[in-house]
Amino acid sequence: MKGWTASDIPDQTGRTAVVTGANSGLGFVTARELARRGARVVLGCRGEQRGAEAAERIRAQAPGARVEVAPLDLADLSSVRAFAAEHKGDRLDLLINNAGVMALPHRRTADGFEMQFGVNHLGHFALTGLLLPKLLEAGPGARVVTVSSFMHMLGTVDPRDLNMERGYRRWVAYARSKSANLLFTHELAHRLRAADVRLVAAAAHPGYAATNLMSAAPKMEGHRAKERFMEIGNRYFAQSPEQGTLPVLYAATGPDVRQDDFFGPPLQGLLRGSPIRSARAKWTLSDTAGRGLWAVSERLTGVRYEALAS
């Protein structure tokens, strides 16, 4: 995959992709590049107006793109269920679990979960489970790609305190949610192998990419100095969203993607550059932790992966 770029994405004509959080940043670029290669892309967006504006930008930048917008709030499981119900009759080849929040002040989802764990992991766990039958019907080439972060290295999942009731630390909460993304991918890959199906579960991280994710929390709190600091980092040190999206696009369309692969830019390049198979924390490869997180995620969301039930 050395030197792999978006121009290497194979033809996606006849395929359908769902991209969460597709109105900006990595999600927008992912949706645009898949649409540019011929895929029909559903933009799952919390704000319908911003989603509609994103769809228009994609059509302007990729003439002929087939994109549509659907409301999806991953902080509300009723919205996740409504989205899945709306698209239950659609073909689905690619699910890109991209949307996320980072280092927010303490907040809770509509269902009472700590916001970062609820949005970054539980919302996507529920969405994937509800869309799984359509993914399994798609046949060879179907994939679930979940976007994690290299910052998962800062914290493993604590099954005794998933909602951080014992003291909230925003960056630890973020790291735990990103570790949960990788544990979810690990356990899903295990179950897909056991079921002997062709759907592939992989993960990716963008390295240090210039998106609005890092400035969202300072803006929410009115900390202009912190917001400015994040903006300077994005401008002078981060790689572009186009470059940061490459590991996601490779995981979704690359020719040699295996179950439980994790792609990102090179560590020696300071998390910049073309995608490679990435290092990951050993706890994200724990079968015991994966099964435990899966069980509690089913209980908290009420979503069971019946098609993979043993």
Image (tube, rainbow, N blue to C red):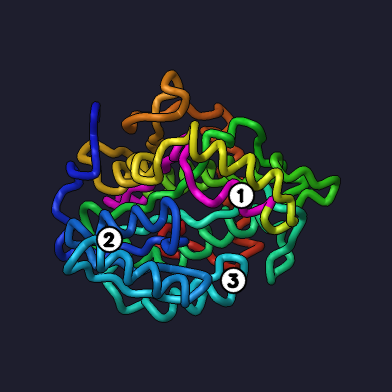
Disc 2 is placed on an element classified as loop
Q: Is residue 158 above or below residue 213?
A: above
Type of the residue with mark 3: Leu
In the rendered image, is residue 116 in sight? Answer: yes
Quickly name the residue at label 2: 93
Q: Residue at x 55, y 28 (%)?
A: 281
Q: Position of residue 32 (x, y in %)?
A: 29, 58
Q: Which residues are magenta?
A: 194-218
**Could you say which is closer to the camera, residue 172 or residue 59?**
59
User: Please, which residue is most extreme toward the top here?
Assistant: 268
- The disc at residue 191 is none
Using the numbered discs, state the Cα–Cα distance from disc 2 to disc 1 in whole angstroms: 32 Å
Counting from the top left corner in percent of width and height, residue 121 is at 57, 54
User: Which residue is more in the foreground, 288 or 162?
Assistant: 162
Rounded to the nearest whole Å, what is the CA distance between mark 3 and mark 2? Answer: 23 Å
Tag of residue 215: 1
Q: Amino acid at mark 1?
A: Ser
- The residue that label 3 is drawn on is 77
